[in-house]
Image (tube, rainbow, N blue to C red):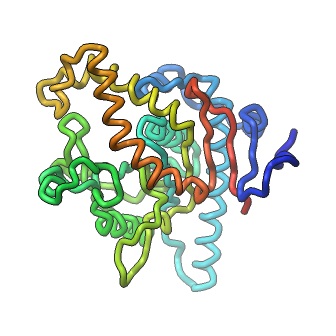
Amino acid sequence: MSTVSHAADPPSLHIRFSAEEWASLRQSTPMTLTATDIDELRGINVALDMEEVERIFLPMSRLLNLYVAASQSLYRASATFLGEMPQKVPFVIGIAGSVAVGKSTTARVLQALLGRWPDHPKVDLVTTDGFLWPNAVLEARGIMDRKGFPESYDRRRLVRFMSEIKSGAEWISAPVYDHLTYDRTEEEVVIERPDIVIVEGLNVLQTGQVDDLNPVFVSDYFDFSIYVHADVLNIEEWYVERFFTLRETAFKDPRSYFRRYGELTDAEATATATQIWKSINEKNLIENILPTRSRADLIIEKGSDHRTTDVRLRRQ
């Protein structure tokens, strides 16, 4: 098995594995999910089955379990040196990627798998959608059409949230986002002493300035980061497919922010979804999200069928 870049490839920060090579690194890691579990974890129009979990996610779970164990050992070593009791500090995993690329499904599957390892049973998942400014604020600032772009997030609050996680705080609250109403709610979710926290969002690997006096980024708090990648044309196709599915489901709900799209014809739905993709999501991907890919510790490359074709692991 080859675990190094091919000779013809230019020098890279990452070691490239085919899906088959990556699958062999699972070794004896047991499958702890059932077919029913996988059905519940699958996102809209995402090709996820037992085979994909076995060949891609189980090796990833094994790798992350090793990273978590090493991190815990490091904390114990520091505590021994300082003559203190080891403090429980969560291992933080960041997951980035475009809209409709499958990063939310990736986050949910990893949460389920990692939570079944005996050494770190409490795994929490936080999406950065909750840190978007409320629609009223975005409208007042004239940036409603840039929702999802870096400036649409309350980045100071997000960085403060990450700092609290890594300080070992007993509990931390995070705002909640409602995808049906397309807005942040008044609710908050409380995270209490997790072993692992997965933070999933579009721009979590970005290094855009938050505070001139304290230039700290969300990614500074990550112990491991993942980028889910696919060709832009494939992601556009998946986005349009997802729009069609939502047109027949969530958009029909009277409470939906996008209920006006629920009665579109096929031609109208295609034109509308394509226009939204081109003017907002593709622009954000090209300008802000894709440039952060090389910063990730692990890159998942997807083919046109939504299945993983290869995996790139950053050289340590």
In the image, taking residue 89 as reference, residue 26 lies left or right, namely right
Residue 85 position within the rendered picture, expressed as x and y whole percent measured from the top left: 52, 76
120 or 304: which is nearer to us?
Answer: 304
For residue 306, above or below residue 145: above
96 or 171: which is nearer to us?
Answer: 96
Q: Classify residue 300 by image quadrant.
A: top right
Q: The C terminus is located in which quarter?
A: bottom right
At horizontal 40% and vertical 49% (from top left) the residue drawn is 284
Residue 63 position within the rendered picture, expressed as x and y whole percent measured from the top left: 67, 49
For residue 11, above or below residue 33: below
Q: Classify residue 278 by image quadrant.
A: top left
Q: Classify residue 41 by image quadrant.
A: top left
For residue 64, above or below residue 306: below
Residue 11 position within the rendered picture, expressed as x and y whole percent measured from the top left: 78, 57
Residue 33 appears in the rendering:
yes
Marks counted in the figure total: 0
In the image, taking residue 245 as reference, residue 28 lies left or right, namely right
At horizontal 14% and vertical 53% (from top left) the residue drawn is 139
At horizontal 31% and vertical 36% (from top left) the residue drawn is 276
Q: The N terminus is located in which quarter?
A: top right
In the image, taking residue 165 as reference, residue 157 lies left or right, namely left
Residue 124 appears in the rendering:
no
